Structure formats: C-alpha cells, structure tokens
Amino acid sequence: MPDESPIPLRRRLAGLARSIRPTADDLAWHPELPAGRMLALPGRGSAFTRDNLRTGPQGDVPVLLLHGWTLSLDTTFFGLMPSLARRYPFAGFDQRGHGRTRLDARTFTVPDLAADAVAVLDELAIEKVVVCGFSLGGPVGLHLALAHPDRVAGLVLSATALTYTQSWRDRLFWSMIAASAQLPRFGAATSVAARYFGANRRVPEFESRWPWLRHELARAPLSQHLATGRAVAGYDLRGRLGVLTGTPAAVVITTGDTVCPPRWQRQLAGQLGANTIPVPFDHDFPVAWPGTFGEVMLRAIDGIQAGLR
C-alpha cells in the first residue's frame, strides 16, 4: 500500500487562488464506468445514477454508493466501480447539489439527502442495501439506516464523523461557510472543489487524470456546495447510533486525514460497534489514490457481504 504525506490544509486553501483554466484535452483520459442515466424521482426532480444490478451471485445485497461533499459519484468512486461491478450488484447517484443531479439544492438537511437515497432505491426497486459512504456519504447512510433500518443490511463508511462541529476550528469553518452564502451573487466560480483537489498534482499518477477530474469537479455551482455545507454543519449523531449496533459495519479510517480527524472516525466506529480498517491517507484518498481506495473499500464490502450470506 502506498504511503502519502498529507498536504497541509493551508496549502490546499491557498490553492483557491490557483488557475484551473480548461485545457484542450479535458477528456483525453476518463475512467471506464457503467452507463449512467438521469432517473426521475417523483415529486423531487431527477438524479444522475449509475447501476449494475445484475452482477454477482443470486442473493448478494446490492451496494449503495454515497459520495463525499463537493465530489460526485464518479469522482469519489471511479477507482471502485469497475471492480465492484464485477463482483456485486450496485447503484449510486450524484446527491442533491452535486454533479449532474437536478434536485432542489437551495435549503436542505442531511435527513433530506437520506430521503433522496430512499427515493432512488424505490425507483430502482431495491429493497435492501449495503451502504458504502465516503465523507458526506457516511452521515447520509447513517440517517438512512436510522430512518429505514429494514432497508440497510450493512454499512461501510470512510473518512466520516458523527458530527463536524467538535472543535473550534470546525465551528469557525462552518461560520465562514454561513458567511459565504452571498458569494455566488458576485459571480464566484464553480471551481472551488477543483482548486482544492488541484493541490494533488504533485502525485505523478494524478496528472493524467487531472483534466477529467477538473471538468467533473466544476459541474456544480458554488451555491449548491455552500447549501450542502450548511446541511453538514447542522447534523449531529452523537449518542444516537445504539440502535444500529446490530447492523454489520466497517469503518475505513484515514489516519492522515486533515479534514476529518482520525479520533472522530474512531469515535464513530466505537459508537457503531464497527470493525476498523486503518489506512495511511488524507481526505483526498479516493481522488489521489483511486486504485488503493477501490481495493480497500472492496475488501470492507467483501467482509460485510460474507457475513450476510
């Protein structure tokens, strides 16, 4: 497993001023992924989804992929979907305020995102899933399990926490997010996520993928990322997971994480009663090291699926 020295958060934030102008070869490289489509969700709008529900031995529980904040289904899971598609049925979608999805992204909560996930499952006629959630996908999956325990057979979570308001640094960050609500009115760009992850261009393998990533990361406007940030700032699952301790769970802990401290990830695993898999990566794990991310997450999914058979 490769080792990575975390990129200091100040260097990433300094990258917000970095130029990420499009290049002529924006789509010179792109991952091979299952076909995608827009899925109409009655009374909600439409969500961009990818699925492969005919894979794997009969009886395997489908996997639901829930991506991270400012990312998307593709940019979080492009290192996992090809191998996952060969082994298990799965479905994933761009959550509200991200990627190609067109759902109301003005004001919403994390439980609203979980309700969107239920609507996707209903439209795809999926009764029960193993949730695979990265970062934001973790609390969305947990809220889904709390609201609909009969629909969640297992949990695989990574780089996520019970709440993101446990330190002064993070409370200050969310205050800044709230204060930034008016920035889109002044023409703020859609490229904040691309500028943040652009710091990874020092990773050799990242360079060839960068044009595609830049293109994908800039799909959602800043206003929608800020709305998601406000939703994240408002959730707190501390002390609420006791009812889920009977649900098979694994937590992949990114021990070099500068966004979600490892101690918070261990706190989550402890309250969930989950097995832990520590890996020496930062919060950019799926973007900077997609192959290793896919291997680790698939191993965790294998463990949950084996216990369900």
Image (cartoon, rainbow, N blue to C red):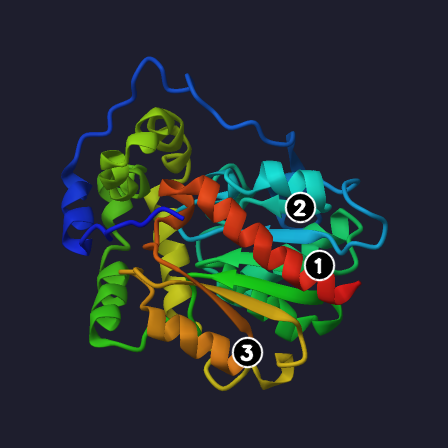
Contact between labelled residues 1 and 2, with CB atoms less than 8 Å apart: yes
Reading the image, the residue beneath label 2 is: 91
Reply above or below: 108 against 69.
below
Reading the image, the residue beneath label 1 is: 129
Q: Name which residue lies at 45% across and 82% down.
A: 238
How much space separates mark 2 and mark 1, taking CA atoms?
9 Å
- Of circles 1 and 3, which is in front? 3
Q: Which mark is residue 194?
A: none
Report the front residue among 169 and 59: 59
Residue 221 pos. (x, y %) = 37, 40
Q: Which mark is residue 272?
A: 3
The answer to whether one can see residue 238 in this image is yes
The amino acid type found where label 2 is placed reads Ala
Q: Estimate how packed mark 3 is, as few (under 14), some (14 to 19) or many (20 or more) residues with alpha carbons within 10 Å.
A: many
- Upstream in sequence: badge 2 or badge 1: 2
Q: Name which residue lies at 60% across and 70% down.
A: 249
Residue 46 pos. (x, y %) = 62, 42
The amino acid type found where label 1 is placed reads Val
Q: Residue furthest top?
A: 24
Q: Name which residue lies at 51% across and 28% down.
A: 31
Identify the element where label 2 is drawn: strand
Contact between labelled residues 3 and 1, with CB atoms less than 8 Å apart: no
